[in-house]
Every structure is written in structure tokens, then in C-alpha cells.
Image (cartoon, rainbow, N blue to C red):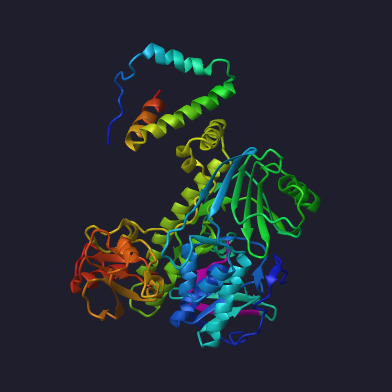
Amino acid sequence: MSTLNTDPNIPKPDDFYARLLAVHEGRTKAESDALNARLILILSNHIGDPEVLDAALDLAAAG
Amino acid sequence: MFDDRYTLAHKVYPYERCTDQGGADPVRHPVVIVGGGPIGIGLALDLGQQGIPVVVLDDHEGIGMGSRAICFAKRSLEIADRYGCGAPMLEKGVVWNLGKVFFRDDKVFEFNLLPEAGHKYPAFINLQQTYFERFLIDRLRALQAAGAPIQLRGKNRVDGIELCDDNVVLDVMTPDGPYKLAADWLVAADGAGSPLRARLGQGFTGKVFQDSFLIADIRMTGDTRFPTERWFWFEPSQGSGASTLLHKQPDDVWRVDFQIGWDIDRKEEMKEENVRRRLDAFLGPVDYEIVWSSIYTFQCKRMEAFRHGRVLFAGDAAHQVSPFGARGANSGMQDVDNLGWKLGVVLAGKAPDALLDSYSEERVFGADENILNSTRSTDFITPKSEISKIFRDAVLTLAATAPFARPLVNSGRLSVPCVYDGLSLNGPDALTGGPERTRVGAPMVDAPVDGGWLIERLGGGFQLLTIDADAPDGIEVDGIAVTRVALSAAGNPELAARYLGDAGSAVYLMRPDQHVAARWDSYDAAEVRRAVNIATARDDRGRSA
């Protein structure tokens, strides 16, 4: 079991952020919502570990 | 006075005047069951096979057309096998393995259930409920002919109930007028609307889902036949419904289930031309006749406890779920399985009536599991909010290309028997390296043995299942007989995998309902005695023998 990594872990944060926005470009709100949902599912599956997922859900829910 | 509330499929227990009518005092019976559906009849078979006199009262005279379960799970068939009527169900039923899931117009994936080898019964069969009930009643008639003390009384309606200290007195109405009868134990198997539950002022709480389903059984009459597969559409574009299920039944009958929304004009939707409009949009140019159709809504509810003094509630009377996952009739059969032997042991004076509290404990646990699964399926099939629909659609879209998303698609999680983890009747789980699937609390897992099946060797009484272990052939624990079933795992990889795991030998104490009460790697007389006492509520785990 591992714990949720909340320390910086993305090598080039600005590049990633730009890429995240870029995939949403030109999409309607509904299309973007659908994309975000797919992305969350894909990443969640990649993580897999229920403890990490729970910690991520809690962190997100706390706002 | 006796208007039928529903049409009968088979009038198999017409009213006959009985000797209890017209006497000065109510005749007293050990067990009276109210409700002649699959649960009431199933319990009558269990008790009748034990030689316990049982009276079943029903306000109709046979099997109704109304409630239409079609999917009977392995455990229900195994229970029916113990009652002597599993074989005709399996013979008549349709076995399917291939399922296809569609989203809008596209097939997103298909799955093959690839059944595990080495079981007498498949994971489930599709069979009209009327057949299921018919086979139970055929068996009941055969047991009666062989002298089993079962009475089945049609057009006997319970109009009043009086709870006394040591029995229950019923006012029963018949076409010949009223009579009274008394029961040591009363079982209410009178359906989701349970008049007895209402009469006793018991609550039934949970969730009502705001959606309606149009259900139709159709017989294909032309040259077209659909394959024996389960097809589930999310948002089919032809406008037949928000989701649609197609399932094969025996006799060339297909079940079609359309999700049609909450704000509908029921009467309008039920008109044949409108039912046909949906069917035609969905099926395309095929010839069919409508055998039966209905509109249903559903709820997930249960009673707080299934035992109230001398009254025990079973089946839909005690708990109700959505149809997704086939957890209605199948969980009711597990109620029957659980209750039958406990009533037998208590009536024989071999255990305190506290044993019947464990019926409520175990089956409430089972009902909660079913309600949880059924609610989750419903939330997937009929998303309740915008965001829940966004995630649902994302899962379906991904399922076409990404295998990881397929297990998230939930069009019903099929009924599997409940494991009574951590409950009061469980003894020690002391088999080091023992398989998880046969842990204490689990129902037996079938395996081939000696040219037959393990399921045929277990059940009906307490048993010691020994695998490559010594034990006496039979012991008695304060009036309760425990007989040994001695097997060897040599040359039997299924038995070894399902009962030994990493252990070299095993001793299982099996309950009469084929659930595991305790297990060890070798026989110890004091340990077995203690486990039998725990499993019959004669001891608690705080005291050791």
C-alpha cells in the first residue's frame, strides 16, 4: 500500500498544464465535462490502489 | 368476496373444504405459512421433507401471471436440488453465457461468462417464474403422495391475526365462510405488499426509484430468432426507451424490458398499439405475439427485523429490491434455506427459539447486500444527476476501447449467495491455508465427487465433511446428530482447490443448509461440540465447552 503523493511529481508542470487546457480547446462545456470524466476514470484505474484513491477523493472533496 | 387480484397461469390448488373448518376450537399446527408463491411453497418442501406438519394458506387457487422473475441463480437451483426439484428446472431452463452491451447504436463490448467447470448447476438459468413454481408444486404433490404432512389450501385468506404467548391465532376466510386456526410459528411469505406486515403494523423502509419499466414477453412467430444471449442497450437511438434489455426464455419467448421514465400515462403505455410501437422500433421487421406485458416501478426496502415473536417474514414480504441482478426470488429462496432447518431444530426442542433470531440476523445481512448491489445497478442504469450521467456515459464510451472500463459497466450484478461473515452462528475458522470461498459462513461450493456431486452428499442435517482426515462416523451433541461425509482430495483437483487450498487435510462442520459452520485441519471432539452449540444458538462464543 502506498500513500497519496501530494508533493510535486510532474517534471514540467507548465507543459502539463498547457497540455491539459489544450485538449479542452474548441470543446463545448458538455464535451469538456465528458472528457474530464473519462480522464478521471483512466487515471483512477492507473492508480488502482484503493487507499490512494480514497485519499485523493478526500483531498478533492475538501476543496 | 373472493375476487382474484390477478390472473392465474395454472389453477393448481383449487379450494377444498378441510377438516379444520367447522370445529369448536381452532386446530393448532406447528407451522402455518401464508402465501403459496415460490417462497411459501419452497419452505413447505423444506419442512415437509423433515416430516414437520405444515399448512400453506393462499388467497388464490394457483400460480399467478403477475410476478415474473426469469433468472434463477445457481444457489436457488442447488436449494431446489435439495428439495428434489432442481433437475426439471435445469432441463427446462435456458443457459446463456454470452452477453452484449450496446451504447446508443454501437456495441461497446461483449462478454462470455465462461462457467467454472465441476458444478452440477450453472451460474444461472432463464426460466419463467410460472415454470419454477410449477416444478415446486409438482414436487410438493409428490411428497404429499409419499406421506409428507403438507397441506396446501387455496382460497384461504387471512382476515385477522391474534398474537398469543405461545402461539398465533388466525381468522381465515374461505368460500364456505370463516374458520380459526392456530400456529406455533407463522411464516409470512405473502409478497411485497404483505397484508400480514401491514396488519402487524410493521414498517418497510427504503428507497423508491422514480422510473417505470415496460416489460413484455414476446413469442417469435416468424423465421427470425434472436440468439440465446443477453443484450443490454443504454440509450438505444430508436426511441424504444432509455435502456432496453433482451433476454431469452424457454418456449421461444423473449423478455424485453424498456425503461420508459417516471411521468408516463400508464394506461396509454399499456395499450397494445403502444407496446407494439416500442417493440417494432426495437426489434425491426420480425413477427411476434405478445404473451404478457406489464408496467412496473420498483423500490429497495426491507423490514427492520424479519422475526416478530412467533411471526417470521420471508421473501418479498421481508425485503424488496430492483430486478437488476435477479436478487428478488433468489434471495427469497435463501431465506427458505436458512429458516427451514432452524424451525425444525426449535420445534424438536433441541435449540432455544433464539436460533430464530439468527434467521433475522443472517437474512437481514443478506438483504442489505442485495439492496446495496441492486441500488448501485439502478444508479448506473438510471443516473440520478447530471454528473452521475456524465460518468456513466464516460464509462460506456471508454468500454469500447479500454478493457479496464468494462467491469465498471453495471447492468445488474447477478445474485450470488450471501456469506454470513462475522455473524453469531459462526464457529472457528481454523483451517490454516483454507480457501476463502469456503470460509466459515459461506455456502458450500459444489465439486465432482465419486461420479456424482458434492451437493448431493450435503444438507438436511449437521455434517462433518472430512477431507483426508479422520473422524468418527457419527456423533451426537446433546440431541443433535452429526454425520460424517468422508472424502479424499487425491485425484480430485476441484475438491482440493475448493476445500483444502494450501492445507493437507480438512474437517468442515456443515449446517443443514449447506453453509460452513466451522472448519479445522483435523478433528477435535470438544471443538466440534462447541461449534455445534454455537451454530444452534445453544452457546455463545464467550463460553467454551
Is residue B530 visible in this depiction of the protein? Answer: yes
Say above or below: B345 vs B428.
Answer: below
- Hey, which residue is sitting farthest right in the picture? B273
B403 or A44: nearer the viewer: B403
**Residue B407 in picture, x, y percent from top left:** 47, 43
A34 or A23: nearer the viewer: A23
Q: Which quadrant of the view contains residue B36?
A: bottom right
- Hey, which residue is sitting farthest top in the picture? A14
**Residue B40 in picture, x, y percent from top left:** 54, 71
B519 left or right of B326 in image: left
Q: Main secondary structure of the magenta part?
A: strand
Is residue B313 visible in this depiction of the protein? Answer: no
Q: Which quadrant of the view contains residue B509?
A: bottom left
A20 left or right of B533 in image: right
**Residue A45 in picture, x, y percent from top left:** 41, 34
> Where does the magenta region start and end?
B178-191
**Residue B184 sits inside the magenta stretch:** yes
Of the 4 image quadrants, the one containing the C terminus of chain B is bottom left
User: Measuring 45% from the left and 74% from the top, which residue is drawn there?
Assistant: B82
**Residue B23 sits inside the magenta stretch:** no
Of the 4 image quadrants, the one containing the N terminus of chain B is bottom right
How many badges with numbers are in the image?
Answer: 0
Say above or below: B520 vs B147.
Answer: above
